[in-house]
Amino acid sequence: MSGGLYTLIMAARRKKSRRKVARKSRNLPTNKKLYARVKAATKRKFAVYPSAYANAWLVREYKKRGGRYRRG
């Protein structure tokens, strides 16, 4: 086989065998209203949001108030 023909065949094979991109599995809050209230309080409390400290406080406060997370 010539080099050009081989390149065309391989390019066609690569197009066919594209893999699906897997979505990231994230922790989702189960109580949306409570999460929204805590998030609003977080934005009032911290000058910089989002930040590592603000997000950590958000998670701790949400769980303290009875919120839970599920994998989604």
Image (cartoon, rainbow, N blue to C red):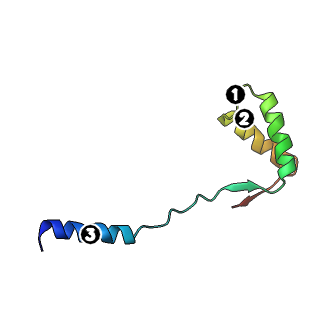
Check disc 2 and report its element: helix, strand or loop.
Answer: helix
Residue under numbered circle 3: 10
Residue drawn at the location 78% of the way across and 32% of the way down: 43
Q: Are the two marked residues, 2 and 1, in contact with CB atoms closer than 8 angstroms?
A: yes
Residue under numbered circle 1: 48
Query: Which sits in the foreground, 63 or 47?
Result: 47
Quadrant of residue 19 in the image? bottom left
Q: In front of the other: label 3 or label 2?
A: 3
Quadrant (top left/top right/bottom left/bottom right) for the N terminus: bottom left
Q: In front of the other: label 2 or label 1?
A: 1
Circle 1 crowding by C-alpha within 10 Å: few under 14, some 14–19, many from 20: few
Q: Position of residue 31 (x, y in %)?
A: 84, 54
Q: Mark 3 or mark 2: which comes first in sequence?
A: 3
Q: Position of residue 37 (x, y in %)?
A: 86, 41
Name the residue at the top extreme. 47
Residue drawn at the location 84% of the way across and 35% of the way down: 41
Circle 3 crowding by C-alpha within 10 Å: few under 14, some 14–19, many from 20: few
Tell me the amino acid under the disc marked 2.
Ala
User: Residue 54 got which mark?
Assistant: 2
Check disc 1 and report its element: helix, strand or loop.
Answer: loop
Quadrant (top left/top right/bottom left/bottom right) for the C terminus: bottom right
Tell me the amino acid under the disc marked 3.
Met
52, above or below 15, in the image: above
Q: In front of the other: label 3 or label 1?
A: 3
Query: Which sits in the foreground, 22 or 70?
Result: 22
Check disc 3 and report its element: helix, strand or loop.
Answer: helix
Q: Position of residue 55 (x, y in %)?
A: 71, 39
